[in-house]
Image: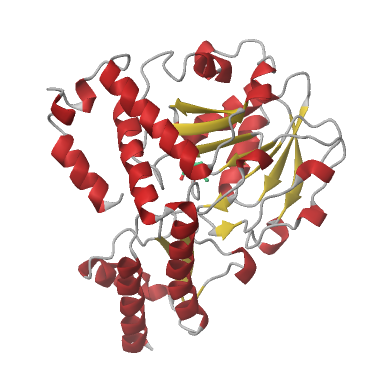
């Protein structure tokens, strides 16, 4: 979270703009909260340049719920959906979808241990598929697409592209018009956990959901009620609005992208110049958000983490499924934070080779 945002939230915690209420105490249908939600959505639309034929939905249930909600809503009459398999999150999305349809793996990077992304030439989109799902940033593996797939030339044409943008949403400019649907859990670049943002092209709302799809899991329910069908995650939406204003102040997505490039480069350059640290991900597909690395001597992992913590460098332990380290350097991580990490890593290497 950007520190400025946390400070503003603290200032406004007990009495939002003289309303006599905390945002947490407001009715979601009252004029105060409606203005907060409207402003948050407008700022997001402006930042991401979202075309008018796309709806923005504020939902709950985490990105993990979307793994089921996407097939429930987009399969229509199709029995098949395509998934690009690049790591743990895309695997989870595909295996959840497998309960509702036949999943066809369009492409995978399994053969190289999920350390790259499969180039578009290797994608085999199945004819008659309902949509193609991919994960632009694999948070655990640290693998990121540096390009947006253009499906317009795919057989059948006009297949909706669906993206789980949870971990690189708003970290760079992206062309919404290339997507049928984008979803992102808020907790990386947008705000606190508890909010999921869905951006959906309006024509997809006409697809009849699978029979038995609960009302709350129908995109149309939320689109028809401007995300106010039930009580939305109000405080998370409020914080999201503050983060959007912060992003605008940083210069928008093009400026934040430059900052993210510079931050990631600092760590990758250090790793590549060293035989003490190692990053397994192919250079062209490395994530700007999540930098996984290992030490040449695994026996030093615990010491590294302990000493890092003593330097104020927290949460560097890699995901439990892969081990090693992972530096997650989302939008709000300042360049100075990354510089501190790099200085520490250099010192640690000097003291342990
Ligand atoms: C790419 C990606 N997808 C999905 C998820 C799951 O999100 P949630 O915990 O909000 O369900 C995560 C969480 O880290 C993620 O990084």
Seen from the viewer's position, the closer of residues 275 and 158 is 158
Residue 165 horizontal/vertical position (percent): 54, 44
On screen, residue 305 versus residue 207, left or right, reads: left
Q: Is residue 50 above or below residue 171?
A: above
Seen from the viewer's position, the closer of residues 6 and 38 is 38
Instruction: Confirm whether residue 225 shows in the render.
Output: yes
The quadrant the C terminus occupies is bottom left
Number of marks in picture: 0
* Residue displayed at 42% across by 38% down: 43
On screen, residue 1 versus residue 146, left or right, reads: left
Residue 350 horizontal/vertical position (percent): 34, 88
Q: Quadrant of residue 131?
A: top right
* Residue displayed at 33% across by 72% down: 341
Residue 7 horizontal/vertical position (percent): 19, 46
Residue 213 horizontal/vertical position (percent): 59, 14
* Residue displayed at 26% across by 46% down: 5
Q: Quadrant of residue 194?
A: top left
Q: Is residue 8 above or below residue 280?
A: above
Q: Is residue 298 above or below residue 213?
A: below
On screen, residue 268 versus residue 327, left or right, reads: right
Q: Quadrant of residue 117?
A: bottom right
Instruction: Confirm whether residue 195 shows in the render.
Output: no
* Residue displayed at 87% across by 40% down: 155
The image's colour scheme reads: secondary structure
């Amino acid at each position: 979270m950007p520190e400025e945002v946390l400070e503003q939230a603290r200032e406004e915690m007990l009495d939002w703009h003289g309303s006599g209420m905390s945002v947490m105490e407001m009715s979601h249908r009252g004029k105060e909260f409606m203005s907060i939600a409207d402003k948050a959505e407008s700022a997001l639309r402006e930042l991401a340049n979202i075309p008018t034929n796309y709806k923005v939905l504020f939902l709950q249930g985490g990105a993990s719920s979307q793994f089921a909600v996407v097939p429930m809503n987009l399969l229509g009459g199709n029995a098949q959906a395509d998934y690009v398999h690049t790591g743990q999150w895309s695997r989870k999305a595909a295996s959840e979808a497998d309960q509702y349809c036949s999943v066809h793996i369009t492409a995978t990077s399994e053969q190289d241990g999920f350390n790259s992304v499969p180039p578009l030439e290797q994608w085999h989109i199945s004819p008659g598929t309902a949509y193609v799902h991919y994960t632009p940033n694999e948070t655990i593996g640290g693998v990121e697409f540096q390009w947006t797939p253009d499906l317009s030339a795919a057989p059948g044409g006009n297949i909706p592209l669906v993206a789980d943008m949870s971990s690189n949403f708003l970290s760079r400019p992206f062309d919404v018009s290339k997507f049928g649907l984008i979803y992102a859990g808020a907790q990386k670049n947008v705000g606190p956990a508890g909010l999921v943002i869905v951006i959906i092209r309006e024509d997809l709302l006409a697809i009849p959901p699978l029979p038995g799809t609960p009302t709350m899991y129908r995109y149309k329910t939320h689109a028809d009620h401007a995300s106010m069908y039930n009580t939305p995650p109000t405080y998370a939406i409020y914080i999201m609005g503050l983060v959007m204003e912060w992003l605008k102040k940083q210069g928008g997505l093009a400026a934040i992208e430059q900052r993210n490039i510079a931050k990631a480069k600092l760590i990758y350059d250090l790793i590549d110049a060293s035989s003490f640290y190692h990053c397994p991900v192919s250079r062209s597909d490395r994530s700007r958000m999540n930098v996984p690395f290992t030490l040449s001597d695994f026996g030093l992992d615990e010491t590294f983490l302990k000493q890092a913590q003593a330097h104020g460098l927290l949460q560097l332990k890699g995901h439990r499924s892969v081990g090693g380290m992972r530096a997650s350097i989302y939008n709000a991580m300042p360049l100075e934070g990354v510089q501190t990490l790099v200085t520490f890593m250099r010192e640690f290497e000097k003291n342990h080779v």
